[in-house]
């Protein structure tokens, strides 16, 4: 990329108010943290596919809950959500609600059944349940696409936060933000290719502690030193709301804003239930009971952050309007500044730089943990589902792992390139991936698990419909925003009713109907498949390494209960 | 097995529940009607359809699932809808906490509600497992107290 183009592209990516310079103590902290991740990844490095994809199915309740938490709490939760709450008011709360309450749907409808199905990847389920390599391929491509779209937001978060810590490193041709994106992504990809799922899971438990400690310390200290709150900022920020601009909390003013809230929240909920890197967490646990309770633990761990983020947003909004400029109106806060509002709030409170650095490091840990989960899911889709199951059925474990590592590198390069000039704030970028997961994968998992007559033709028709419909608002709104096409939304009316950020509200029901209708008018799936679905719902306990298919193939006798 | 001991002691301590001992004794001490149904069911022969549960276990499980789903739906979409319909009523300030009510219901009510529901569901599901005599390999150490609950569940039938 030429120097001039780089300058033009990233002009909007310098967060105003953020102290961009090299800071020694925070830099040491972040480097130490990254080295720790690498070390843990190295210690738990894997040589077999079982360890690479499902951590040997050895993970317990609390540990899996923490992994669910840090896998989940990305830069979008840590940075992007506070950004939207600060700048978009009540609309930002759709993210708080969608990203937490979705786990309940996952718990009651899918978690235990997924554990019983017990394969390796999300596309595995689709391929085996619907007996179709085409379905497996569509799911694998979707998984890869989700990993890519989702990770762009993470890379943006890492880049912006890295600016605070390392400053503008000034490598020729690249802006400071771009150098940071490249650097951070290189570290992430490096440790992932080494460690695989077991290392990622061990790391995620550590990352969870860093993420949550950094955020809770941050919000408590910011609240304390500014006199906003004492010990429970999560509840005490309520007193502050009446002093902020009305935009921060005003209720819906029009049907449009209400509709957008519902659409976004719905998309985030069904997306939660369809995201491959979330679903795969239920394959890694010991038993279905662990799958259930680790979801409860995970949701609790997630809530700790989600109760705090609106408080941080409120503090940040107040500090910003006092010290930097107006948050709302024109010009208002830029999306880049909003995306680091969590770090800004700490910095504007006049905290020592190591403490601000801790908050920033938490953001980086959040991004890395999620990218880890996403890339593992994406690379296993390529290596396990496309390569080993379709392209080269005699693939050795060595070959599979090699392909897995190569696809992690490929994902890393693609993501880095796209993140050099991201089209939207972190949370918006991430929510496109949620719409995709909710539109294509969630209906397959839900119907596949809960209606045994869902068949191959239905799944293929439903998934194709979902993919095509998901692309409509992407082409309508998001692609133009990348700047090559004039930057205008093609059809504003369509964008109102089918916004890219919440398109699943329209698309998911359509995919359900298409799948059901096509399944009804075509032949029933084979008995073997139906028995597999029934085994997923049988309350009979299963062995730790058993899958539903094993049980069904072994003659269909359920394991005897002692 | 541990079941036997805890069961006897339960009957001893919970002597108040008069009809307890005979029922459980005739069932062999550990097997309730539900558990018997469960043993007589070959789940691989029963249709899976979320709208037409085909086994007693799934019927009871889905009752819990749908109850939870309804509560969840109200918690998630109720407050924003109410806020849209009656913005002035719902944006009044709350006493003590100072939140506008709609803000509190959405930002704190939503996540907390889902968490409590998730806890409630997992408890319910564990109780259902016990009622049907299902043991998972990873039951926690507190098996003793859980079996007391199981025995109580049996008595209730």
Image (cartoon, coloured by chain):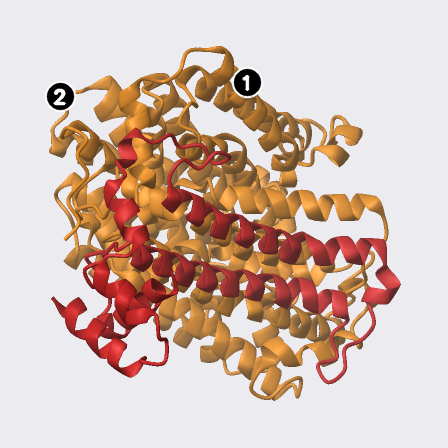
Chain colours: A orange, B red
- Mark 2: which secondary structure? loop
Q: Chain of mark 2?
A: A
Is residue A536 in sight in this rendering? yes
Q: Is residue B147 left or right of residue A366?
A: left
- Mark 1: which secondary structure? helix
Give B126 or A13, whichever is nearer the viewer: B126
Q: Which numbered marker is on residue A394?
A: 2
Disc 2 with disc 1 on a shared chain? yes
Q: Is residue A143 left or right of residue A550?
A: right
Give A543 or A96, whichever is nearer the viewer: A543
Examine the rendered structure and indicate whether residue A504 appears above or below residue A177.
above
Residue A260, position in %: x, y? 73, 44
Residue A8, located in which quarter of the rendered image?
top right
Q: Which numbered marker is on residue A517?
A: 1
The first of marks 2 and 1 along the sequence is 2
Task: Give the class, few, some or many, for how many residues have Cα within 10 Å of label 1's Cα (few <14, many ≥20).
Answer: some
Residue B82, position in %: x, y? 78, 57
Examine the rendered structure and indicate whether residue A108 appears above or below residue A418.
below
Is residue A34 in sight in this rendering? no
Q: Chain of mark 1?
A: A
Q: Is residue A493 left or right of residue B53?
A: right
Residue A268, position in %: x, y? 57, 46
Residue A227, position in %: x, y? 66, 88
Q: Say which residue appears at 18% left-offset and 60% top-offset.
A: B28
């Amino acid at each position: 990329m030429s120097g001039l183009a780089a300058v033009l592209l990233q002009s909007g990516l310098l967060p105003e108010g953020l102290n961009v310079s090299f800071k020694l103590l925070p830099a040491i902290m972040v480097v130490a943290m990254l080295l720790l991740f690498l070390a843990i990844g190295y210690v738990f490095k894997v040589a077999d596919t079982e360890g690479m994809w499902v951590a040997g199915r050895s993970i317990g309740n609390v540990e899996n809950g923490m992994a669910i938490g840090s896998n989940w709490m990305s830069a979008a939760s840590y940075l992007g959500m506070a950004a939207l709450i600060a700048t978009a008011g009540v609309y930002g709360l759709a993210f708080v609600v969608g990203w937490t309450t979705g786990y309940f749907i996952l718990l009651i409808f899918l978690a235990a059944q997924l554990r019983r199905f017990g394969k390796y990847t999300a596309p595995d389920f689709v391929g085996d349940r619907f007996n179709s390599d085409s379905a497996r391929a569509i799911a694998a491509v979707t998984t890869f696409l989700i990993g890519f779209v989702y990770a762009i937001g993470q890379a943006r978060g890492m880049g912006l936060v890295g600016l605070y810590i390392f400053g503008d490193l000034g490598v020729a041709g690249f802006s400071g933000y771009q150098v940071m994106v490249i650097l951070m992504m290189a570290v992430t990809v490096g440790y992932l290719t080494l460690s695989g799922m077991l290392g990622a899971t061990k790391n995620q438990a550590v990352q969870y502690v860093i993420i949550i400690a950094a955020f809770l310390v941050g919000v408590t200290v910011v609240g304390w030193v500014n006199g906003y709150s004492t010990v429970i900022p999560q509840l005490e920020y309520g007193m502050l709301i009446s002093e902020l601009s009305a935009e921060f909390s005003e209720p819906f003013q029009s049907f449009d804003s209400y509709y957008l809230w519902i659409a976004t929240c719905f998309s985030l909920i069904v997306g939660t239930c369809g995201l491959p890197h979330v679903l795969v967490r239920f394959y890694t646990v010991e038993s279905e009971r662990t799958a259930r309770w680790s979801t409860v633990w995970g949701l609790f761990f997630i809530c700790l952050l989600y109760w705090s983020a609106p408080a941080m947003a409120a503090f940040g909004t107040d500090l910003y309007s006092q010290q930097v400029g107006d948050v709302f109106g024109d010009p208002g806060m830029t999306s880049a500044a909003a995306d680091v509002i969590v770090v800004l709030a700490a910095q504007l409170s006049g905290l020592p730089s190591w403490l601000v650095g801790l908050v920033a490091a938490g953001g980086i840990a959040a991004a890395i943990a999620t990218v880890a989960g996403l890339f593992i899911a994406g690379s296993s889709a390529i290596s396990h589902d496309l390569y080993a199951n379709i392209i080269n059925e005699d693939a050795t474990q060595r070959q599979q792992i090699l392909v897995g590592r190569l696809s992690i590198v490929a994902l890393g390069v693609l993501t880095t390139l796209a993140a050099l000039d991201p089209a939207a704030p972190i949370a918006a970028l991430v929510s496109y991936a949620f719409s995709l997961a909710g539109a294509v994968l969630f209906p397959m998992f839900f119907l596949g698990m809960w209606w045994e007559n869902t068949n191959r033709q239905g799944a293929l028709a439903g998934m194709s419909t979902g993919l095509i419909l998901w692309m409509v608002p992407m082409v309508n709104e998001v692609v133009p925003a990348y700047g090559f096409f004039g930057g205008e939304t093609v059809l504003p009316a369509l964008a109102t009713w089918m916004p890219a950020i919440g398109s699943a509200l329209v698309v998911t029901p359509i995919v359900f109907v298409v799948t059901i209708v096509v399944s009804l008018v075509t032949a029933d799936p084979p008995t073997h498949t139906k028995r597999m679905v029934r085994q997923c719902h049988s309350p009979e306990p299963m062995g730790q390494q058993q899958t539903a298919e094993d049980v069904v193939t072994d003659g269909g006798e359920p394991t005897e209960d002692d | 097995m541990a079941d036997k001991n805890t069961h006897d002691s339960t009957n001893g301590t919970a002597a108040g529940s008069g009809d307890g001992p005979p029922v459980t004794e005739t069932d062999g001490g550990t097997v309730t009607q539900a558990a018997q149904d469960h043993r007589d069911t070959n789940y691989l022969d029963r249709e899976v359809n979320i709208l037409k549960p085909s086994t007693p276990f799934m019927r009871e499980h889905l009752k819990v699932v749908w109850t939870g789903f309804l509560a969840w739906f109200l918690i998630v979409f109720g407050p924003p809808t109410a806020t849209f319909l009656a913005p002035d009523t719902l944006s009044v300030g709350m006493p003590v906490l100072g939140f506008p009510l709609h803000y509190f219901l959405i930002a704190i009510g939503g996540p907390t509600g889902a968490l409590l529901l998730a806890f409630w569901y997992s408890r319910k599901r564990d109780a259902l497992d016990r009622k049907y005599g299902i043991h998972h390999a990873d039951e926690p150490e507190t098996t003793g107290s859980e079996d007391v609950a199981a025995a109580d569940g049996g008595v209730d039938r």
